Image (tube, helix red, strand yellow):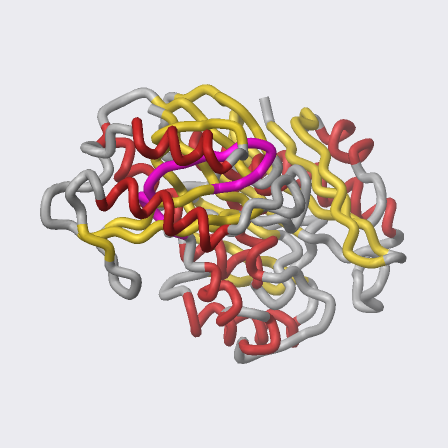
Amino acid sequence: MLYAFELSGEHEELPRAEVLACLDIVGAVYSEHVFFDQCLVVDIDGSDEIIDKKMELMAERLSFSHHIVKVMGICDSDVDTIIEMAENSNIDDHIVAGETYVVRAKRIKHHTRIHGANLEGRVGGSIYRKGYSADMKNPDVEFRLILTERCVFGSIVASVDRSAYEARSPQKKPFFYPGVLMPRMARALVNFSKAGEGDVFFDPFCGTAGILVEAGLIGADVIGLDVQEKIIGGAQMNLEAFVPEYSLFVGDACRVPLVDGCVDAIVTDPPYGRSAAIKAESLHHLYAHSFAEMYRVLKSGRMAVVVSEQPVDGFACDAGFVVVETYLQKVHKSLTRIILVLFKE
């Protein structure tokens, strides 16, 4: 069965990568069908009921997506072709007798000049003629037209509550410190690590706990370490607002107080020389020894994700990691983040 993920346009690669990571997390058996601008379509094996439950779980984790759509058809972004597809579509697996519906069109960038409201009305009419009633305010089913390089048509099975991430923005948390990752990015990094519910999750440079909060909210057992006692106090305030259980330590990431192979996932955003409180001989010393410690405490076969302003893949490889993916995110003219996804064999 084909499912489409309506992606945010925040980055060219990260939204798609996050979807693929979450498909692995929920145990979906899938293959990529086609990738359009801001729309990834995958073919997922299994019964509709089981897949729909997995999609609901994914919607609770995803940060760089808007909706998950059960696909009815894909066609050229031409009005007559879209109407013909809607007329000929079998909607029995998308709506049942007595349920109401609405049709919404999402035009992606400038891939088409189709007028969305007019198209919504005409496709809605084709569904009405199949014996269903429309409800513009409180429908049971929302049919979605994603107008990108082609038109993807289907019904929404799950949606991402992106407003929840805005409610956890750094300035709205009990303790605020400038320069931290935004919650949507922090959640995506957690997803890249493939941390699951009940996994031990570690951030050796936890700062104000933005990453730990996102990991805790998906059910991981979170552990944070930071060299600054004041920052750990702020991290505690933030975790208490969102996560019921956590562990925090004041300590040195070059000498982590954890036993070998006890951690299921690591995500961290190390300092880049901005902090005067780094208790290390140099940044080279900090990176070399902290990567070695991350490798030591991580279980074999698991992932670590590291964010940096400068290339640190050499430190990762020297520690023993395999670099799985590298992503670049331009924050502003003078700052480009490097995101390394690492694997411990």
Residue 83 percent location from the top left of the image: 40, 35
> Can I make out residue 272 in this image?
yes
Which is nearer the eye, 345 or 85?
85
Which is nearer the eye, 238 or 58?
58
Residue 313 percent location from the top left of the image: 78, 33
Image point (79%, 45%), residue name: 287
In the image, farthest residue toward the front: 80
Relative placement, left or right, of 274 versus 258 is right
Image point (57%, 75%), residue name: 233
Image point (86%, 51%), residue name: 283
Image point (41%, 64%), residue name: 243
Q: Main secondary structure of the magenta part?
A: strand
Height in image: 68 above or below 248?
above
In the image, farthest residue toward the left: 98
Height in image: 213 above or below 97?
below
Height in image: 106 above or below 299?
below
> Can I make out residue 61 in this image?
no
Image quarter (top left, top right, bottom left or bottom right) of the N terminus: top left
Residue 41 percent location from the top left of the image: 47, 29
Relative placement, left or right, of 203 versus 128 is right
Relative placement, left or right, of 340 versus 223 is right
**Span colored in magenta:** 146-159
- Asked whether residue 154 is drawn in magenta, I would say yes
Residue 123 percent location from the top left of the image: 36, 43
- Asked whether residue 121 is drawn in magenta, I would say no
Relative placement, left or right, of 161 versus 142 is right
